[in-house]
Image (cartoon, rainbow, N blue to C red):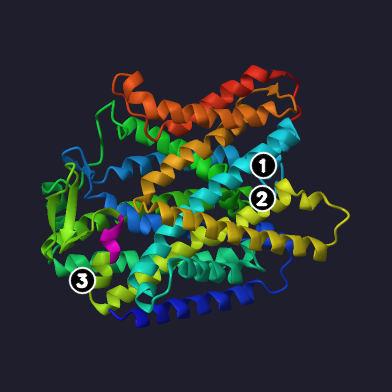
Amino acid sequence: MSASLLFSFVIGYFVLLLVVAYFTSRNSNNDSFFIGNRNSNWMLVAFGMVGTSLSGVTFVSVPGTVGDYAGSLHNGFAYFQVVIGYFFGYLVVAFVLLPLYYKMNLTSIYNYLQKRFGTIAYKTGALFFIISRTVGATARLYLVIFVLQEFILKSFGVPFVVTALIILLMILLYTFEGGVKTIVYTDTLQTSLMLVGLVVSVVYILNNLNLSVGDAMRTLTDQGYTNIFNTDPKSGGFFLKQIIGGMFITISMFGLDQEMMQKNISVKTLKDSQKNMITFNLVSAGVNFLFLLLGGLLYLYALNHGAEYAQAAGGKMQLLSGDKNIMGDELFPTMALQFMPQAISIIFIIALISALFPSADGALTALTSSFCIDILGLKRRDDLNEKQQKKIRLTVHLSFTVIFLACIMIFYRIGDRSIIDKILKLAGYTYGPLLGLFAFGILSKRALPSTLMITFICLAAPVICYFLSQNSEKWFGGYQIGIELLIINGLLTYLGLLSISKKAELAQ
């Protein structure tokens, strides 16, 4: 497949985004950037959020997990345990958190912490969001940029840092003016193209292997690729841990995340926002299952085209195509760009960058919004006019682009391309304090002193969790801490806040 041809489609796709951004950002202002003038169409928001929540990591990494090994068995569809948890988590967001945010008419969801506990809790919550979203977004960005680098731009002699910079500048250009107002429309376009790529890939492989969907499921089951439930209580992948952990991951990474909720609260009414959540929830579960089906089919396709499993030094299993290990995140790009027809390769690249941009543009916009509103207090500055506020906002937007580049380069130096598990693990450390703060505000009637002890507790909880995670097998008879790390982190934060709290009558 010609790298030049693929790159021309990347450029054409970006030009299309710029055209959409031009028309949607006309007459925009700071409220357009932050909350889309609270006038977004709920159906567009729901559909666009599918792309934002899935991202390039889901597109590349989730299919790759299917054929990886957990002990002597394939992981199979085990990731769907987490997806079941996501389903219940989205219901909590829709019927517990959204009513709270709309009742308080929030622009930043962290304003809730200010009204409940004061400035220090508010700024602490915003700070943990900024850390969490920066780490998560750049991890997702790194994986997709790496694929574009390896399969397209590397052949032109372009260094990785230049590839990363080009992609970030693309995102910066079409989000610079319109913010959320633009992103609602670009995410809808990008989600459509990503799902087209997913469906086309599944249909092509089924036809190539002469399988119906039913035949494919039977074949995958016979070869051990469709296992879902892990019944070992000591394992990090035990199904109850995965489902409960997935639920709290959603509550934290979605319901307590300014990026995701920024789009929800841009919808005019609470009822429409809840319809958006329910629609998104159902579609997202179906799409995740389709990605797992694609993963199983990709392994069958690879094995049918000369790949074979082999045991590497240390006992870890590899899937070799020639002398290259294509297990995990390497599988889909290798198959699509080297073993499938040119048309499928083009569709894959378009779908991949469509999966990349929604998670990145939303993160960049939300981080800019949170820093401007929560840290700088831009909405409360009466001494600044609209033009001055916009200048500050654009400066912050550009600064976060530079920070993104630095973080992507750190991931590149580390060189780990099995990203999906890393993102969930990092979320356990960074979103735990947010979970504890919001849970304490919603579930208790107690007040907190406005001191830096709040920040100290929120910093101490992840440190304690790290030592628990590293030593759990030794301390707890072989028990492995998995996705439930987030819950433990949130509970430690909650207990720490409880220890410094006092009784108070709260005005709700």
- SS for dot 3: loop
Q: Predominant secondary structure in magenta? A: helix
Tell me what residue is drawn at x 71 percent, y 24 percent: 448
Q: Which residue is mark 3?
A: 339
Q: Amino acid at mark 3?
A: Phe
Tell me what residue is drawn at x 66 percent, y 28 percent: 454
Q: Is residue 309 above or below residue 159?
A: above
Disc 1 and disc 3: Cα gap in Å?
A: 48 Å
Of residues 493 and 26, which is closer to you in this image?
493
Q: Is residue 260 above or below residue 40?
A: above
Q: Residues within 10 Å of mark 3 (few under 14, many from 20)?
A: some
Instruction: Report the mark closest to the observer, 1 or 2.
Output: 2
Of residues 91 and 61, which is closer to you in this image?
61
Magenta residues, start to end: 329-333
Q: Which residue is mark 1?
A: 110
Q: Earlier in the sequence, mark 1 or mark 3?
A: 1
Q: Earlier in the sequence, mark 1 or mark 2?
A: 1
Q: Which residue is mark 2?
A: 370
Disc 3 and disc 2: Cα gap in Å?
A: 44 Å
- Please indicate, yes or no, whether residue 439 appears anywhere in the rendered image: no
Q: Residues within 10 Å of mark 1 (few under 14, many from 20)?
A: many
Whether pointer 3 and pointer 2 mark residues with C-beta atoms closer than 8 Å, the reply is: no
Whether pointer 1 and pointer 2 mark residues with C-beta atoms closer than 8 Å, the reply is: yes
Disc 1 and disc 2: Cα gap in Å?
A: 8 Å
Of residues 494 and 191, which is closer to you in this image?
494
Q: Is residue 31 left or right of residue 248?
A: right
Give the percent coordinates (x, y) of residue 184: 57, 63
- SS for dot 2: helix
Q: Amino acid at mark 1?
A: Tyr
